[in-house]
Amino acid sequence: KRYWHPYLYQLHLTMSKGPTSLATSPVALAFPHIQWDPLGSLRLTAQETALLRMAETNPIEYTLADSRDASMYARVLLKLLAEASSHGGGDVSKLTGPQTEEGARAVLGTDPLGVVTHYALTKLYDIISTLSTGASGVTVGAVFYVGKDGILVDQWKALLRILNKGGRGDTYSQTGAALCLGLILVAACPSQKAISPTVDKDGNAIKARVISYASAMEPLEALTAWVIAQLKISNPALAIPTLHVIMSSSESRLLFCSTGGIKYIARQLKVKGGSVKSSTPSAAAEAAKKQGGNSSVQQLYELAFCLWTLTYELNSSPVIRNDFGGKDGLVVGALTDLVSVAPREKVVRVALAALRNLATCTDEITPGPAGSPKVDGKVFLAEMLACGLMKAIEYLKERQFTDPDIIDDVQTLHKLLVENYKEMSRWEVYKNEVESGHLQWGSCHTEAFFKENARMLEGSDGDFHLLKVLISLLNSKDDDIAAIACYDIGEFVRHYPNGRAIAKRLGAKELVMPLIEHDNVELQRHALQCVSKIMVQNWEYVK
């Protein structure tokens, strides 16, 4: 059974103050000073100009009260975007912060089309936000999907063109265009019908309208590809508002997962959250506060929230379970790091909730293909143990939380981890730890362990896969992991027949040698010992 926090989603909205809201344009103070008549390149008709002026003088609810007026207004704004954004690359794109009224008017003089682009996006977002409430009785579907079949209007392409400008476009325009497009397209997803408003502000029933999801699929795929591209190039701030829109429907979530989205979110979490390492969670938390700042913590929270949302697709798709698992344990490792570093309570809350869903997922409803490895909660629990979640959970058990959900998650995860640990042999624990890349000092990194298990590093196929992973971990940026890898390789060499030759053949010596001069004294010591074990026949005499 999937686990659901009763109020976590609403709490998220409160804490993030609206993840899908559009920030204020840096030239917003210039909007009232836009003169439409001199801007002939926009090719506005007299009727369109009059509509823009009327919309400025009336409350937006009045303009949107009639579906025909709302549709016309939206199309005029999309026309502005199509005409104005094609010129791009002006002074607006060079702005780095909000402008005073004087500064904004100066930019309007030098780059009027850039200001018009911001204006149109701001107004378009206001339209969509208002329509989404259903207060006027007119819906997003009624405005942006036309005809008896409810086909998406062609003018949506103006928004995609802004996204395709890449580095030539400014941040506000790209964020706004992606967000508006996401809200328009997700409205077509069938799962949205259940949460769409059914009555207006006066209690009158809103007429249901046919919306063609098929007409929105290709644009949604293009938008998802753009979001993925931003995550790939480590530019999540640009994509996070749209990413949250994508998370709001099951269809768009599945599409996001099918394009590898899960691993890209996890990589961003590792980049932003994994740089803060320390010997204890409390010290790590303090380091995170000094290094990350509120902006970084907020991004960690938003990305972790997206992962938590995606865990609700685990039971419905073997492909998604595999994506969450993966051979490198990336997702579980990223979430474990968040729990260990604990930069803010809200980050810990969503990370724990995601880990709990992973630990309790099942393949009973949708088993994987015949002959494929089983991926369920036990697999994820093994990854959690390998990543050192037990240590972090034991620390959290000692903290005083007021949130009952955090307390319940901590207790449940601790119980599940203990039960799973009891079922695993020491070799299984070690194997999972090495494969996850999260090495931690413990009973599996001792002389006694390698005396008993050195031969197990051969692997079932005799390819020494696990030894190769250990050798690759010598390149880890985490000094502790590299030091443990040095120790383990040295102990393998000591206790496996002809281990010295095998380690040399696989390139261990070449990777360990530079570590002898490393700045970290502890890593330096273990590297020197490892090289000595590889070079010297009878290590015991040297020891």
Image: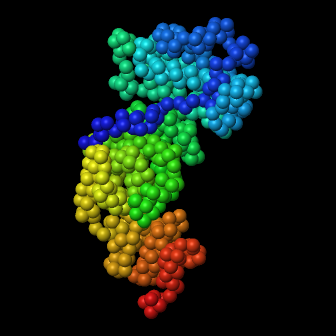
Q: Could you tell me residue 176's position as x and y percent?
A: 57, 30
Going by the picture, which residue comes out furthest to the bottom?
Answer: 541
Q: Which of the 4 image quarters holds residue 120?
A: top right
Q: Is residue 416 above or below residue 364?
A: below
Q: Is residue 494 above or below residue 36?
A: below
In front here: 467 or 110? 110
The N terminus lies in quadrant:
top left
Which residue corresponds to the image point at 53% horizontal and 24% vertical from the top-left? 125
The reply to whether residue 377 is in sight is: no
Which residue corresponds to the image point at 45% horizontal and 28% vertical from the top-left? 186
Which residue corresponds to the image point at 36% horizontal and 46% vertical from the top-left? 349
Which residue corresponds to the image point at 42% horizontal and 78% vertical from the top-left? 492
Q: Which of the 4 image quarters holds residue 191?
A: top left
Q: Which of the 4 image quarters holds residue 364?
A: top left
In front here: 221 or 94? 94
Q: Is residue 337 above or below residue 232?
A: below
Q: Could you tell me residue 32's position as x and y percent?
A: 64, 19
The C terminus lies in quadrant:
bottom left
In front here: 317 or 117? 117
Q: Could you tell me residue 413's position as x and y percent?
A: 28, 53
The reply to whether residue 401 is in sight is: yes
